Amino acid sequence: MRNRLSPSVRRTSLAAGAAVLLSTMAAGGPALAAGPATPVISLSADYLSGAVDATGDPTVTVTVSQSGTDASKLKVTAASSSKPGVAGTGDVTVSGSGTTRRVTVAAHGVGYTDLKLKVTGSGGKTATRTLHYAASAKVQHTADTRYFTGSSDASAAVDAGDGYVIVADDESNVLRLYDRNASGGPVKTWDFSSELGVSKEIDMEAAARVGDTIYWTGSMGNNKSGKFKPDRSTLFTTTVTGSGARTQLSLAGSYKGLRADLVAWDQDHDDRYGFAAGTADGQVPKQIDGFNVEGLEFAPGSTTTAYIGFRAPLVPPKKGGKALLVPVTNIDKVVTGKHATFGTPVELDLGGLSIRDIRKNAANQYLIVAGSWAAEDNSAPYTLYSWDGVAGHAPVKLQSLPTDDVGGWEAVVDVPDLRTPGARAQLITDCGSADLYGDGTEAKDLDHDEWKKSRATWFTVTPKTGR
């Protein structure tokens, strides 16, 4: 018959055994080896936007590590996709080695998918993070197209040199610096709202640079409900230091009376352009007889006279009317608080279209983006013209701009030498009202800024010569 130990004896024996084990460990005896640590994975952004068949889409940086393991031994893969029809695991490319990897996605369908990225380390231990990915449709001129993310309502642009551009937004007061040649988010941002004393959107629609000073202006029109909003009449200047990725901006001057000055000037000239009626309470700005500014550029050879380009009104306000430029002859003094003075207006035949942007180069060669005065006109005609800046000289049609893709053409970054065969210019769209991802949501209303974007495309604006 087997002897049975009482419970109290068994407890005593277990305690004694534990004491022996602890004593052995304290004396340097053998201990159980710990398993490999769980690896760590992090993403530079949890949200990413791409486009079908895009060139140079934005990327995400993946950082990985595992305690006690050489980072080069860690493997990063795409483990799953919630919507393979948008982008599957085979559409994800991981490049690089060591702690930092780069992930690119080649979309083949419009919509959203969650991509699970996995790091595998020593001992088969894994960790995952989810990349929320959105893909927009294929566009024309794919190879010459880049996407500026973080905002969808690009409305004006100024060259910052060394391949960078400062872009304004008509839905916020943020200025953003982008690499012109790469899709992705802004390198730097500036918001001068508090310094300007504005609490609402300026509705920035136009800009012009002279030397190290950039002039920015709101649309000056009523809002879409026909209400006067003073902040939209803000004209301000920023001083530029540095260039390219090193660009810095500081606020210089500002003025909120240019709209009132324009109305008073027009009234003094027999209400020729109907500015008083166009700014009246209840008047919607984007009407053929409305009041809406979308262009700003200096007159030929001048640093003090700038053309104000109007989206509305047309002159006369009927089909086939001409586009309007009004010269402000003392714009350098206006931003110090002086009332504006005006020169002789310029009326341009743009085929019944109005000014959406105007930009010139040092040789006084101008490019004009002409578009409709109407609202929600992303599919309306757009035409690119050249001009010499001289009143009485007719602009020359260069080409019709594509309108089959979402977004309205809003900005010219800079003007190449138009005497050079095959010269190219970069134009930017406002995609704010576009349904980028096929779910009925306007881009400006998307939940994540990383999914908002404007499209920038290079166009050849002069004929190429054959050999």
Image (cartoon, rainbow, N blue to C red):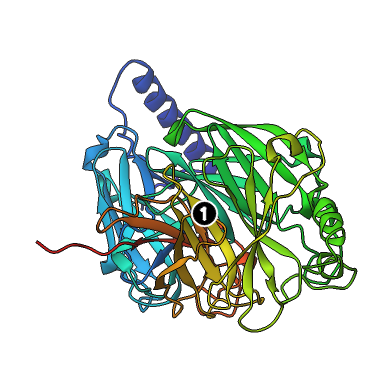
Q: Residue 36's image quarter?
A: top left
Q: Which residue lies furthest to the front in this view?
A: 392
Q: Is residue 188 above or below residue 204?
A: above
Residue 42: % across, % down: 43, 46
Residue 401: % across, % down: 43, 72
Asked if residue 143 shows in the view, the reply is yes
Left of 160 or right of it: where is 191?
right
Q: In this view, does 159 lie above or below 408?
A: above
Give the total of numbered labels: 1
Left of 311 or right of it: where is 243?
left
Per the image, the residue denoted by label 1 is: 389
Q: Residue furthest right?
A: 281
Residue 317: % across, % down: 72, 78
Q: What element carries label 1?
A: loop
For badge 1, the amino acid type reads Gly
Q: Residue 277's image quarter?
A: bottom right
The answer to which of 225 and 459 lies nearer the viewer is 459
Identify the image quadrant of the C terminus.
bottom left
Q: Which residue lies furthest to the top in this view?
A: 27
The answer to which of 433 and 325 lies nearer the viewer is 325
Tell me which residue sits at (76%, 35%) in the image. 195
Tell me which residue sits at (29%, 64%) in the image. 143
The answer to which of 446 and 72 lies nearer the viewer is 446
Residue 287: % across, % down: 73, 76
Asked if residue 200 shows in the view, the reply is no
